[in-house]
Amino acid sequence: MSLMPCRACGHKVDTSALACPGCGATDPAKKISRQERDLYFSIVYTLVWICVLGAFGWGVWKLGVPWLKQIFDRPPIVQPTLRIPARPAAPTEEIQDDDEAE
Ligand SMILES: [Zn+2]
């Protein structure tokens, strides 16, 4: 239990006092008030979130966009099983000849 001058008006207040009895300032014995501390905290919190979201957005932009481009710019996949062999269609011609001969 010690007395400190109020940061707002200089009135001697107890360090554990929640408000100055002279001027009504909150946390009179502390360097900054609770409101100021909350304000600084919210500012820091917002800045941290901007950094996090900015880094995330940058990562999506730098990694995700080329990845999507790679997917959409990729030529259609030619499956080896559907590839027609470069061979003369001899067997079909033979069958047709047999049908026409009769
Ligand atoms: Zn005061």
Image: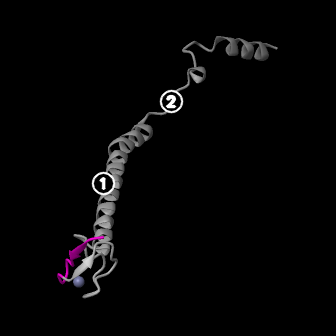
Observer-nearest of 44 and 7? 7
Residue type at numbered disc 1: Cys
Residue designated by label 2: 77
User: The magenta stretch spans which residues?
Assistant: 1-10
Instruction: Give the spatial CA distance, label 2 vs label 1.
Output: 40 Å
Q: How many marks?
A: 2
Q: Position of residue 4 (x, y in %)?
A: 22, 74
Q: Going from the N terminus, do you reach mark 2 or mark 1 first? A: 1
Q: What's the mark number on residue 41?
A: none
Instruction: Indicate the quadrant where residue 65 lies.
Output: top left
Q: Residue furthest left?
A: 10
Query: For the residue labelled by badge 1, is the local secondary structure a helix, a strand or a loop?
Result: helix
Find out whether residue 7 is within the magenta segment.
yes
Residue designated by label 1: 51
Q: Position of residue 83 (x, y in %)?
A: 56, 21
Q: Position of residue 23 (x, y in %)?
A: 25, 88
Q: Position of residue 31 (x, y in %)?
A: 22, 70
Observer-nearest of 66 and 81? 66
Q: Quadrant of ligand 1?
A: bottom left
Q: Residues within 10 Å of mark 1 (few under 14, many from 20)?
A: few
Which of the image's four quarters has the C terminus?
top right
Observer-nearest of 87 and 59? 59
